[in-house]
Amino acid sequence: MKDRIIKHSIALFEKKGFSETSIQDIVDTLGVTKGTFYYYFTSKEQLLTQIHLQYIDYILEQQRRIIEQPDKSWKEKLSDVIQMLIQQIRDRGGSARIFFRELLHITGDDLSDMTGKRDQFRFNFQFIIEQGMASGEFRDDLPADMMTFSVLGACNWCYTWFNPDGPMSDAEVASIYTEMFLNGMKK
Amino acid sequence: MKDRIIKHSIALFEKKGFSETSIQDIVDTLGVTKGTFYYYFTSKEQLLTQIHLQYIDYILEQQRRIIEQPDKSWKEKLSDVIQMLIQQIRDRGGSARIFFRELLHITGDDLSDMTGKRDQFRFNFQFIIEQGMASGEFRDDLPADMMTFSVLGACNWCYTWFNPDGPMSDAEVASIYTEMFLNGMKK
């Protein structure tokens, strides 16, 4: 039931916006009572936090696995992370969109937890670029943090336009992006 | 007064979110009555539309001027548009943030007007890339629409992290981005 609540809430938040969606709207969609909602979540904000944490924890774990692959170059690891990110937008587009749009509704400790994890993802991304600079795979005349922002930004932006039913698959988009960025980062 | 309402509303929408900001909040900040608000705007949604239109009309006009410069290469024009976009995020960060975040609150004809203009900006951007491909300044083995999405996405993403008081100026960020992208797009 918890997962069903999360799934339906993502759809509602995405369509109507977080503020305009009431707990009543959520339980009505599921045909359950508010009691059921409150059994799993203390508030709508806590539900939103759970949605965000699920998303960020998942991509952090995937990123960690990619970085730890022993036989791959830093170029390949960067390419794998780009592909994973765009695939996530394909599979969890709703989560991604509300993640970026509704972040201002998360406050206090939840917010520090969330921004800490977002920063972690970015730092890991930058780590790949720095290692690739050190190994001579990437040019080292541009600041690694700015290269990180630009590549990560371009990938994240896909949530605003990528359509899984469109003419281009997530893998195709990722491969064009990778080709362009790796070329841009070439020594 | 109209401009003051717009300016203060942007700050409020950015901080609290559009839905959580009431017309009462806006007029309280300005020390005026609701009558004043309704003299200039028919609703909060119409005010949001005005904010979005001001932003998009301004960057469209700047883009048009850049494209029409007679003595510049397509590379230089692309670089100028990137610089203009990031400078706008410096100067009108609040507008940019609420533009991307609150778009779902615009509906009907206003929405078609807005998305039409956003698409126009993207098509003009793609036009620069296509012209640069035709002139031999850019590689032509990657689809121009995807190159557009990636560069434009990276620039737009700056609104999530760029801090005008941070260590890097908007001109520096733009020059690093341009260098990386132009290199990525090199034949």
Image (cartoon, coloured by chain):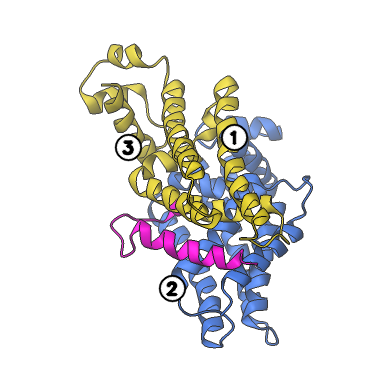
Chain colours: A yellow, B blue
Mark 3 or mark 2, which is nearer to you?
A: 2
Q: Residues within 10 Å of mark 3 (few under 14, many from 20)?
A: some
- Residue B96: percent from left, percent from top: 60, 51
- Magenta span has A75? no
Specify the segment rendered in magenta: A158-187
Nearer the viewer's eye, disc 2 or disc 1? 2
Circle 3 sits on which residue? Answer: A11
What is the secondary structure assignment of the residue under circle 2?
loop
Q: Are marks 3 and 2 on the same chain?
A: no
- Residue A74 horizontal/vertical position (percent): 55, 53
Asked if the residue at tag 2 contacts the one at tag 3, i.e. Cβ–Cβ closer than 8 Å, the answer is: no
Q: Which mark is residue B143?
A: 2
Q: Is residue A177 magenta?
A: yes
Q: Which mark is residue B34?
A: 1
* Viewer-closest of B91 and A146: A146
Residue drawn 79% across the image and 47% down it: B167
Q: Residue B152, relative to residue A56: is it above or below? A: below
Give the alpha-carbon distance from disc 3 to disc 1, as whole Å: 35 Å
- What's under tag 1, amino acid-wise? Lys
Tell me, yes or no, whether the two marked residues, 3 and 1, touch with CB atoms within 8 Å.
Answer: no
Question: Mark on residue A160?
Answer: none
- Read off the chain for label 2: B
